[in-house]
Image: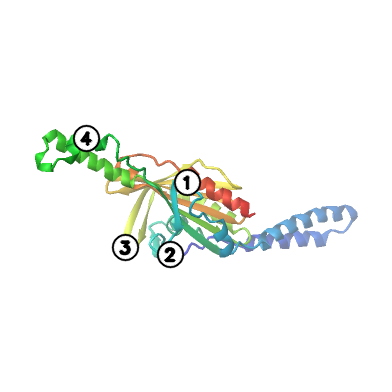
Amino acid sequence: MRASFIRRSAVAASAVSLALLVTACGGDKEGGKEGGKDAGAGDKAKNASAAKALTAAELEKAALAQGDVPGYKVEKAGPADLVDAGAVTVDKAECKPLADAWYTAKPGSPAAAVQRKVVQEPASTDPGGAASQDPAKDKKLGDMTEEELDKALKDMENSVKDAFSVNVVIDGLSSYDGKGAEEALASLRTAATACAGGFTATVKGEPTKVLRVEEEKVSGGQEAAGWALITDADGDELPLKLVLVRHGQTLASFGVVNLGAAMSGAKDLPLPTAVIDAQVGKLAKLG
């Protein structure tokens, strides 16, 4: 089930029809001037409604590739990384566009879309560092003192946290006909406002409870919007981030999660600005 809020050509077509009607009614010289102005506005509306979306092949050229973002691994997102909108249900209908954007990485009903999975590379451990010089490191657990055992367990816990303390970004590019990109982004803003108090999204029988939706201050492209979806992770709060940037008739979307942040009890998740800037910059070069 896909969100059906995008009304691609109806509004634009109505605007064009109105402009043509006003032009046809212009009779005198002064009226002709006014009619000319309205006709110009109509042409702009017509051009906007007739504008064609980028093809999937064109989006592939603008999508991030390995090496575009230092410190991140980039690959095509696969079936395990994405969910079809039909598999997403919500307890509040007004929240469906927001849930779809997060799970599918293609808001609304784009004409074409491509997705990438962008994973931050974990910090490497220096084998010659202080940890390797710890005499207790080579001891068997049974030979450790209580203090050494506590330290070993703490080190192990920190290692697990470090392994998961990486940003995982699903980067999507979606192109729309006419004013579809603007309408999709506007509908997401409406949904985020309506769902600020939270909602529950369910995928394949697995519910995710969003406790609240908070606005993020973002910028870029011709317009941008972002939100933090604060979810309930077994009693702890796990922040998820969703950012969208519009360039012409294309939306770049970024869904961000960092499990290490939840494990460490972090209340916020910094945005991966390097990924966002690289993708928006590459999209802008496509024209």
- Quick one: quadrant of the C terminus? bottom right
**Residue that mark 2 sits on:** 84
**Residue that mark 3 sits on:** 205
| Disc nearer the start of the sequence (2/1) | 1
Considering depth in this image, is 254 or 49 the residue closer to the camera? 254
Considering depth in this image, is 141 or 39 the residue closer to the camera? 141
Three-letter amino acid code of the residue under disc 1: Pro
Q: CA distance from mark 2 to mark 1?
A: 30 Å
Q: CA distance from mark 2 to mark 3?
A: 14 Å
Q: CA distance from mark 4 to mark 1?
A: 32 Å
Q: CA distance from mark 4 to mark 2?
A: 50 Å
Q: What numbered label is drawn on residue 82?
A: none
| Disc nearer the start of the sequence (4/1) | 1
Q: Is residue 237 left or right of residue 144?
A: right
- Quick one: quadrant of the N terminus? bottom left
Could you say where residue 101 lies in the image, as x and y percent from the top left? 46, 56
Whether residues under marks 4 and 1 lie with C-beta atoms below 8 angstroms apart, the answer is no
Q: What numbered label is drawn on residue 134?
A: 4
Can you tell which of label 2 and label 1 is closer to the viewer?
A: 1
Can you tell which of label 4 and label 3 is closer to the viewer?
A: 4
Residue found at x 53% / y 60%: 5
Circle 2 SS class: loop
**Count of numbered circles on the image:** 4
Could you say where residue 194 lies in the image, as x and y percent from the top left? 46, 50
**Residue that mark 1 sits on:** 70
